[in-house]
Amino acid sequence: MTDVRTQANKEKGRNICTALRTLTVLYSVLGPVAMLLVSAVTAGWDLNAFWFYLVLVEQMLGTVYLSLVTLLWELTRHVRRRAGEDLRDTPFAKGCHLVFLVAAIAGLVTIVVIPLILADLAGGPVVLIHYAFGGVLLLLYVIFGVYTLVSRTVNHRRAERQRLEEEKQAWEGYLN
């Protein structure tokens, strides 16, 4: 009876995880498309105005976009972990994901400074805090991407060496 419930929970977790992954991919693709469309519609047919509005929209929404993508990614990881999937995180990866989560939440919270600046309730340099969290998220994505690439390469080479060693032992056993 317990095994049936566990299987049902795992299946439910997989379905939720699939939905979250789909939502993350859609947002990852449609977010920049929406930013480009807002800039194009605002600028009309003027190319110089388009670039101006694109930079303006990126400044306003770039950190929010990265923060929401990161939160969706971390939510998907949380659901996968709750569904019983072993993520095999190293301590470095766990630390990176914690910093990702903190930076994403802080990036969303700092969007409040932009209306304060527009209402002249805060100085312009205060927005640098908002940009800093966007920069931290970009830097974390680069660091984590390099870490993932290196660790997967090392794991692939280790598995290949092990496979070749097993094949060698099998041939030696066959020939003897």
Image (cartoon, grey):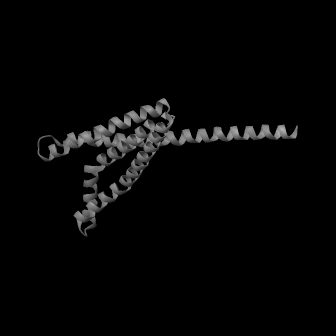
Q: Would residue 173 be seen by someone viewing this image from the given angle?
A: yes
Which quadrant would residue 150 be assigned to in this image? Answer: top right
The residue closer to the viewer here, 110 or 55, is: 110
The percent coordinates of residue 154 (x first, y second) are 59, 38
Residue at image point 33% right, 35% down = 102
Q: Residue furthest left?
A: 120
Residue 84 against residue 24 in the figure, above or below:
above
Please identify the quadrant where the C terminus is shown.
Answer: top right
Residue 41 against residue 25 in the figure, above or below:
below
The residue closer to the viewer here, 3 or 141, is: 3
The percent coordinates of residue 48 (x first, y second) are 26, 64
The residue closer to the viewer here, 156 or 52, is: 156
Residue at image point 41% right, 36% down = 97
Q: Is residue 156 left or right of residue 112?
A: right
Residue at image point 24% right, 40% down = 110
The percent coordinates of residue 163 (x first, y second) are 70, 40
Residue at image point 28% right, 55% down = 55
